[in-house]
Amino acid sequence: MTINYAIYAVILVVLGYIAYKDIKQRIIPNYAAALVLILSTLSFFLERGTIRDYLFYVFLAGIPLLLLGFIVDTVSNIRKNLSGYITILVGITAGLVFPSEDWRLKFIVGSTFFLILLVVQALFDKRKDEADDDAGSLGGGDIKLIASLGPVLKDEIMFFLFIAFLSAFIFMKARKEKNIYLAPFILISFAIFILLDIGRI
């Protein structure tokens, strides 16, 4: 338990660095997000977690946000992204028909198919849409960062996301900001998670 809290503290420091980069340069460094994933992975397996549960929590943290953004993009470009509907349908179908009564495993399989097809589609889709560069949208860096925290947050991921997005929304409304600086609020939400976890001891 002590080791895990030491890992949490390091993650908090890395998140602080990421928040700084997000505010100053509007970027979330891939190497920093990768470090968070490595640390959260270490923490997860120190608690003797299984590979199945590890994949489930990574996907649970990242896939819903990725899917939401993908749906919004697909709907806004309905004629260009017909293949987007096929990608979503195949992912859902793969999860539903997978021969297992384990719903977590079904979710992993469906998410894996969705990601594979998404990558394939991205490789073949050479179109450049200026809307993808809109600073006011939830970026891929934000999604990767949240997914990297999945193994640490586990079943608390929904509470974590609620706090992060609520605080970001309140800040944007109060400051009348158009840009989403989500990393600072991910930092705040993770700090709250640590404090609540310590309170359970």
Image: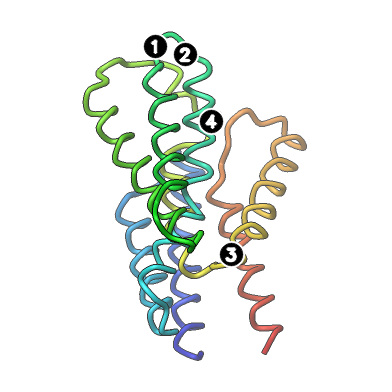
Give the distance between the C-alpha atoms of the residues marked 4 and 1, in whole angstroms.
20 Å
Is residue 40 among what the camera can see?
A: yes
Sequence-wise first label, 4 or 2: 2
Query: Does label 4 or label 1 sit earlier along the sequence?
Result: 1
Which tag is nearer the camera, tag 2 or tag 3? 2
Position of the C terminus, as image quadrant, is bottom right
Identify which amino acid the numbered label 4 is placed on.
Answer: Ser
The mark nearer the N terminus, 3 or 4, is 4
Separation of marks 2 and 3 at Cα, in angstroms: 35 Å
Label 1 neighbour load within 10 Å: few <14, some 14-19, many 20+: few
Query: Where does residue 107 sit, x and y in percent of width and height?
Result: 46, 53
Q: Are marks 1 and 2 in contact (CB under 8 Å)?
A: yes
Q: Nearer the viewer, mark 4 or mark 1?
A: 1
| Disc 3: which residue | 190
User: Label 2 is placed on what type of residue?
Assistant: Asn
Residue that protrudes farthest toward the top in the picture: 79
Which of the two discs, 1 and 3, sits closer to the camera?
Answer: 1
When asked about the image quadrant of residue 48, the answer is: bottom left
The image position of residue 124, as x and y in percent, is: 22, 23
Element assignment for label 3: helix
197 sits to left or right of 1: right
* Earlier sequence position, callout 2 versus callout 3: 2
Residue behind mark 2 = 77
Indicate the secondary structure of the residue bearing disc 2: loop
Judging by the rendered image, the residue that carries numbered circle 4 is 137
Marks 4/1 in contact by CB < 8 Å: the verdict is no
Q: Mark 3 is on which residue type?
A: Phe
Disc 1: which residue: 80
Q: Amino acid at mark 1?
A: Lys
- Disc on the earlier residue, 1 or 3: 1
The disc at residue 26 is none
Distance (Cα) linking label 3 and label 4? 21 Å
